[in-house]
Amino acid sequence: MTDIRSDSSRRTRPDSPWHVRDFRTLFTATTLSQLGTNVGYVAVPLVAVAALDASPGAVGALAALSTLAFLLIGLPAGAWVDRMRHRRVLIGADLIRAALNASVPLAWWLDALTLGHLFAVVLLTGCATVFFDIGSQSTLPGLVGREALVGANSAVVSLQAVSNIAGRGAGGGLVQALTAPVAVLFTALAHLASALRLIALDGRQAPSRAAPQAPLRAQIAEGLRHVLGNPELRALALTAALTNLGVQIVNTMLPVLFVRELGLSASALGLFWAAGGLGLLLGARCARPLAARLGHGRALALVGPLLAPAALLVPLVGRGSWLWAAGAGWVLAMAKIGTENVLGVSLRQRMTPDDLLGRMNATFRFMLTGALAVGAALSGLLGELAGVRVTLWAGAAVAAVSFLPVLLSPVRVRRALPPRQPEPAAGRAARTA
């Protein structure tokens, strides 16, 4: 049975998710989870460097392994999530991440920590994160109602932006004060707290009604057809993939440029990235007003050409005023991403039947994370062959034109979010049976 107070609040204020108890529960749990993830983003590589004397190549392998999970199991995970109760998926993923991260300081205290252990923890934690991310995005429409998706996604994207700033700053402070392995313990405790908070989530939400006897490959193919066969969803996926590709090419080379070529401090690089987090937050907060004024699709189509070219200021980074100019370009480019994350995710959730939400989200995650992996590899290759500045220009150019798929698609003429999508015939047949 649905919470009566939540239903009443949704009727009186259909554009606000905050009166829905389950949304507040999920948001609080996601806050804890994001905080732990961002502390681990700083602490785990420093465990490899400080405690295990890892080489730069080994540290790079750690980063690759955290991304690899989405490529290995991203697509089947979507089909599995569609078959399971989302609450169980979220709690299980958090408990697994808590146990894996807790094993790092425990092994360190026992003087048994190895680089292979750390590799395994990062890879398996990435696998659990795949399920948490897909499950979280798939359960959101059912919690708040599809009419409140823009507000809910705006809150979640804003949370991610704040977590990127606060969590990574806290991670650095914890490493400095308590050592890197102890900071990883904080990550484990944050995921445990998230799992405990998720116990309060309504567990009666039914899993997908997709036919359980359907082969996994057929279910994955159905998700791919839904995304790639729809011109609007395909445009959203291509724009997001191009954005990730360009940004990753730039991000991979920024530490080399800042520290090695410009002689700037690591804190200057951290502040530059933090400015990007502020831009992401600004874009997320502006998304709803822009959609209300311009129309949902028009806002998505216009924010790209207005803000994306600012990425071309980033390769000009240098000392003095050029650092500020590049920082301003980075803020504007990230603001574009923040707006697209809110409006794009809301649109794709609204265009997808409940039975396909997990597979749709998995398809997007697969494409977007694949773009990150390709971007990192391309950046390293271009950096070796053509130099750091040329690599930055290449990444900035990709980011600057990433808006084209959406601008050239039917998204640009969409005034409002579509009505709730009907259930696929396969899902209706399975439920009837």
Image (tube, rainbow, N blue to C red):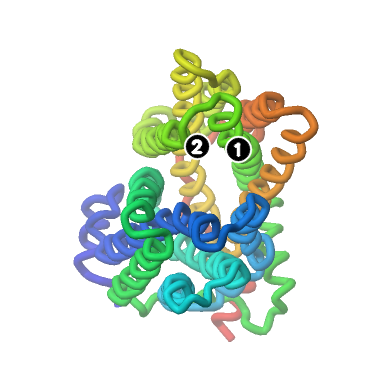
Q: Quickly name the residue at label 1.
A: 243
Can the viewer see residue 410?
no
> The C terminus is located in which quarter?
bottom right
- Is 386 placed above or below 410 here? above
Expressed as whole percent of the image width and height from the top left, the position of residue 342 reads 44, 43
Q: Quadrant of residue 270?
A: top left
- Is 126 placed above or below 316 here? below
Residue 163 appears left or right of 93: left
Q: Quickly name the residue at label 2.
A: 337
Q: Considering depth in this image, is 352 or 345 the residue closer to the camera? A: 345
Which residue is at 46% across, 48% downward?
A: 346
Expressed as whole percent of the image width and height from the top left, the position of residue 278 reads 38, 35
Q: In which quarter of the image is residue 359?
A: bottom right
Q: What is the three-letter code of the residue carrying label 2?
A: Ile
Closer to the chain start, of discs 2 and 1, is 1
Which residue is at 70% across, 51% downward?
A: 228
Expressed as whole percent of the image width and height from the top left, the position of residue 351 reads 54, 52
Which residue is at 55% across, 77% downward?
A: 83
Query: Which type of secondary structure does the marked residue at label 2 adopt?
Result: helix
